[in-house]
Structures are given as structure tokens and as C-alpha cells.
Image (tube, rainbow, N blue to C red):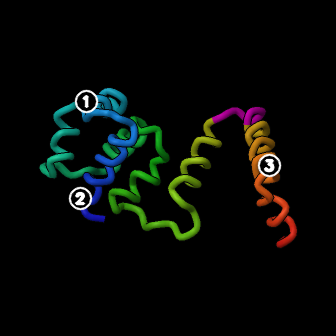
Amino acid sequence: MSVVNFVDWLQNELNKRNWSQADLARRSGVAPGTISRIMNNSRGVGPELLNLIAIGLRLPPEQVFRAAGLLPEQENDSPRAEEAKFLFQQIPEEDQEIIIQLMRVICEKKGAYRIQEENE
């Protein structure tokens, strides 16, 4: 992905959250001028800055690195699956079990869980 595409991706992430560049700067701990230069394609992004942006956006760093073209696209995981895995790992183990149970109930309700079990 080119820098321009990363800027488009980042702008899309800001739009989804209804955030300004200043909001991202505040949440990521990056100077507002730095965010502005990224968005104007007058500054590149490296690993440290991408990690801070990931923190600000509350996204898995791998997702932000992929958007910047620094990691290859994953064939198996969608961005949502990657984010779900990242978020799941952030919660305490006892709460993880609650999430798993909730996911099972939703899958059973939709019939997806039974289909998967039959295919195994």
C-alpha cells in the first residue's frame, strides 16, 4: 500500500469515528502537527509512529502496519477478525469465557455453529 493509500485508510478510520486529526493526536500522544504532515503526505510513518496510531485508534498494531504496507495482507483473517482477536486478548481470562459463551449462543441462534460442527 502506498503512503497515499495509507492516508486514505487513516482518513476513513477518522471518519468512521467522527474524529478530527486533533482527536487522533490527543488519543495517540502524537503531536497534532505530525498527524497533519502525515495526512498531507509530507511525512512518512515508521514503526514507532504506527504503534502510537494503533493505540490511538484502539486497533491491533498489525492492522495499522498492514494499512501502511509494512506487513503483508493476511489471507485468512479479515480486519474485523483481527480486531476481535486483539480485543479478546485484552480482557481478563474469566471474561473471555463469557465472550466465548456469547459467541456460541449467537452462532447457535443463526444456525452457523451447528453447521460448523457437522463439517468437523
- Direction bottom: furthest residue: 119
- Residue type at mark 3 is Arg
Give the residue at x 80% y 58%: 111
Which numbered disc flags the more N-terminal residue, 2 or 1? 2
Residue 109: image location, x then y, percent: 80, 50
The span from disc 2 to disc 3 (Cα, nearest Å) is 40 Å
Front one among 11 and 59:
11
Front one among 45 and 120:
120
Residue 64: image location, x then y, percent: 40, 51
Could you classify mark 2 by the number of other residues whose Cα lies within 10 Å: few (under 14), some (14-19), or many (20 or more)? Answer: some
- Residue type at mark 1 is Ala
- In the image, is residue 32 part of the stretch drawn in magenta? no
What residue is disc 2 on?
A: 3
Q: Quadrant of the N terminus?
A: bottom left
Which numbered disc flags the more N-terminal residue, 3 or 1? 1
- Please tell me whether residue 114 is drawn above or below residue 43 in the rendered image: below
Q: Along the horizontal axis of the image, is 106 left or right of 91?
A: right
Give the residue at x 39% y 55%: 65
What residue is disc 1 on?
A: 22
Residue 73: image location, x then y, percent: 45, 67
Q: Main secondary structure of the magenta part?
A: helix
The reply to whether dot 3 and dot 1 touch (C-beta < 8 Å) is no
The image quarter containing residue 98 is top right
Q: Quick one: SS at disc 2?
A: helix
What residue range appears in magenta?
Answer: 91-95
What residue is disc 3 on?
A: 104
- Please tell me whether residue 114 is drawn above or below residue 94 in the rendered image: below
Which numbered disc flags the more N-terminal residue, 2 or 3? 2
